[in-house]
Image (cartoon, helix red, strand yellow):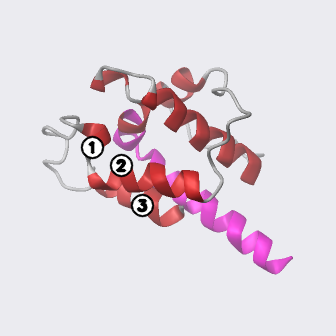
């Protein structure tokens, strides 16, 4: 999942990436791969709704809460995906907005940290 987050952030790494990046957003290979991986790895759950305050959290991105654990990360990613699959306008895609604020790099690092924590036991 961390790799897919890095792939999502890579869409923004080029100085010209912001040009037309929103065109066909959900059809872009890294976005499709990100969503499919999240589902395959159990980050998307039928039992959960979208995180309260998700849109505000992404728009005014200050990073991941210090106390965020794997459950929080799962819920956040689940919420991003569910939110965006219900949108019709590209400017409302939170998965798109998160890349603009370097959010995927932060998520990837947090996921890696959780994996290292799990590996240590």
Q: Earlier in the sequence, mark 2 or mark 3?
A: 3
Position of the N terminus, as image quadrant, is bottom right
Number of other residues with Cα within 10 Å of mark 1, as a class: few under 14, some 14 to 19, many 20 or more? few
Q: Circle 3 is placed at which residue position?
A: 6
Give the label on residue 70, or none.
none
Contact (CB < 8 A) between labels 1 and 2?
A: yes
Position of the C terminus, as image quadrant, is bottom right
Give the label on residue 27, or none.
1
Give the label on residue 31, or none.
2
Label 1 and label 3: CA atoms lie apart by: 18 Å
Q: Secondary structure at mark 3?
A: helix
Number of other residues with Cα within 10 Å of mark 2, as a class: few under 14, some 14 to 19, many 20 or more? many
The question of residue 22 being in magenta is answered with no
In magenta, the rendered stretch is: 97-121
Number of other residues with Cα within 10 Å of mark 3, as a class: few under 14, some 14 to 19, many 20 or more? many
Residue sitting at 29 percent across and 26 percent down? 90
Residue sitting at 33 percent across and 55 percent down? 30
Q: Secondary structure at mark 1?
A: helix
């Amino acid at each position: 999942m961390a790799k897919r987050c890095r792939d999502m952030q890579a869409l923004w790494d080029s100085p010209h990436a912001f040009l037309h990046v929103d065109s066909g957003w959900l059809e872009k290979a890294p976005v499709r791969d990100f969503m499919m991986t999240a589902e395959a790895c159990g980050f998307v759950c039928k039992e959960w709704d979208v995180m309260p305050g998700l849109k505000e959290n992404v728009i005014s991105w200050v990073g991941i809460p210090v106390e965020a654990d794997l459950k929080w990360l799962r819920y956040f990613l689940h919420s991003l995906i569910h939110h965006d699959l219900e949108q019709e306008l590209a400017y409302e895609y939170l998965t798109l907005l998160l890349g603009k604020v370097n959010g995927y790099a932060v998520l990837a690092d947090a996921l890696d940290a959780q994996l290292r924590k799990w590996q240590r036991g």
